[in-house]
């Protein structure tokens, strides 16, 4: 076999191997959300409520992170709860975990309520923000027994507001998102 033929076969084998190992490299998977996607995101959000660290690092968590970037018909942008979270309510590794939890919680809510872009309606924006914060609080409460060092005064304050039935007012009082 000639060196050129060998290199051509080797190149083809490498490309096939890479496309099997890294499907995202093989093709652009951008597409609208499907009902199967919505169901999967709902399952991932439910799992993340219980154990956000394991879910975030799981194959499902990695799928969600890629899918949420690639889906073409939904906007899962940040909101003022995410801004509040990232600017002091959560610190260290908790910040990254809660950011994932916020994104998966808001995406599950948006998909289940068919809210493609919550920025188009103040009511949708507020509902999505509230759903994201509720997801954060569920995950945070489930993490505290095994990770007491993550305690956050801001998240504890939000839990107190939720328990008093004033979480919507708590969210309304959060500082606004900075202008983009």
Image: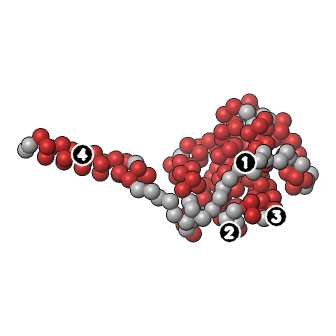
Which residue is found at the position 69% from the left and 62% from the top? Answer: 117
For mark 4, does the 10 Å Cα neighbourhood hold few (<14), some (14 to 19), or many (20 or more) residues? few
Question: Of the numbered discs in the image, which one, if any, rests on residue 129?
Answer: none
Q: Is residue 41 visible?
A: yes
Labels 4, 1: front one: 1
Picture quarter containing residue 115?
bottom right
User: Looking at the rendering, in which quadrant would you find the N terminus?
Assistant: top left
Q: Which residue is mark 4?
A: 11
Q: Nearer the viewer, residue 30 or 152?
A: 30
Residue 165 location in percent, x, y? 90, 55
Q: CA distance from mark 3 to mark 4?
A: 54 Å
Q: CA distance from mark 1 to mark 2?
A: 25 Å
Horizontal side, residue 56 vs residue 90: left or right = left
Q: Which residue is mark 2?
A: 114
Q: Earlier in the sequence, mark 1 or mark 3?
A: 3
Which residue is found at the position 66% from the left and 56% from the top? Answer: 76
Labels 1, 2: front one: 1
Q: Element under label 3?
A: helix
Which residue is found at the position 45% from the left and 56% from the top? Answer: 28
Residue 111 location in percent, x, y? 65, 64
Q: Earlier in the sequence, mark 2 or mark 3?
A: 2
Q: Earlier in the sequence, mark 3 or mark 4?
A: 4
Q: Which residue is mark 3?
A: 123
Q: Which residue is mark 1?
A: 180
Q: Element under label 4?
A: helix
Q: How is the image coloured?
A: secondary structure
Picture quarter containing residue 14?
top left
């Amino acid at each position: 076999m000639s060196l050129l033929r060998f290199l051509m076969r080797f190149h083809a084998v490498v490309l096939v191997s890479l496309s099997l190992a890294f499907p995202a490299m093989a093709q652009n998977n951008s597409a609208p959300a499907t009902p199967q996607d919505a169901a999967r995101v709902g399952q991932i959000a439910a799992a993340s409520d219980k154990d956000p660290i394991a879910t975030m690092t799981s194959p499902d968590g990695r799928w969600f992170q890629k899918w949420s970037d690639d889906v073409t018909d939904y906007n899962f942008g940040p909101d003022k709860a995410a801004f509040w979270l990232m600017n002091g309510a959560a610190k260290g590794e908790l910040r990254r975990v809660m950011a994932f939890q916020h994104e998966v919680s808001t995406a599950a809510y948006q998909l289940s309520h068919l809210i493609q872009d919550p920025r188009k309606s103040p009511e949708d924006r507020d509902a999505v923000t509230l759903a994201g914060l509720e997801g954060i609080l569920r995950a945070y409460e489930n993490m505290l027994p095994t990770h007491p060092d993550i305690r956050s005064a801001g998240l504890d304050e939000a839990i107190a507001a939720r328990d008093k039935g004033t979480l919507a007012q708590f969210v309304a009082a959060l500082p606004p998102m900075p202008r983009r």
